[in-house]
Image (cartoon, grey):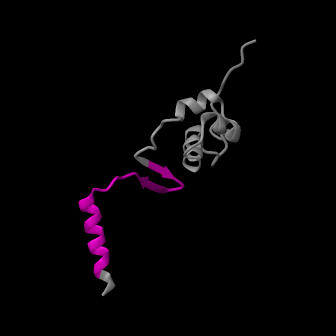
Amino acid sequence: MHKSHTFCPTAEKKGRPKGSGTAEERVREWRQQHPEGRKADCHRDTRLDPKTIRKWWDSMPPAVRVQDGHITVRVTPSQAVSDLLVEALGQGKD
């Protein structure tokens, strides 16, 4: 017997619970907390599938991230920008 699928705008979406994060974020966060850690240690602590850990092990964080209405942009300032900031912030000390 074939079931008919109908669209229901009030139906709740299934999937990951809100705020649970992604496997990529969990692996990245674990690596930040354990810089000398191994994939096996990450698996033991996070219970993520070893294939998932291998997939995200060397991933770089995104350049732009939006979380809870906040935008985070990853930047690497040059020495010139750093010197400019130090000078500008130092002017308010008088």
Query: Magenta stretch containing residue 81, yes or no?
Result: yes
Q: Residue furthest front?
A: 36
Placement of 3 over or under 79, stated as above or below? above
**Residue placed at 58% from the left, 50% from the top?**
33
Q: Nearer the viewer, residue 79 or 67?
A: 79
Q: Which residue lies furthest to the top in this view?
A: 1
Q: Residue furthest bottom?
A: 94
Classify residue 36 as left or right of residue 73: right
Whole-percent x and y of residue 66? Answer: 48, 50
Q: Which of 76 and 70 is in front in this view?
A: 76
Q: In which quarter of the image is residue 85?
A: bottom left
Q: In which quarter of the image is residue 28?
A: top right
Q: Quadrant of residue 36?
A: top right
Classify residue 22 as left or right of residue 90: right
**Residue placed at 60% from the left, 37% from the top?**
38
Placement of 1 over or under 38, stated as above or below? above
Quadrant of image for the N terminus: top right
Q: Give the range drawn in magenta.
A: 65-91
Classify residue 74 as left or right of residue 68: left
Whole-percent x and y of residue 40? Answer: 65, 34
**Residue placed at 41% from the left, 48% from the top?**
64
Whole-percent x and y of residue 34? Answer: 59, 47
Query: Magenta stretch containing residue 21, yes or no?
Result: no
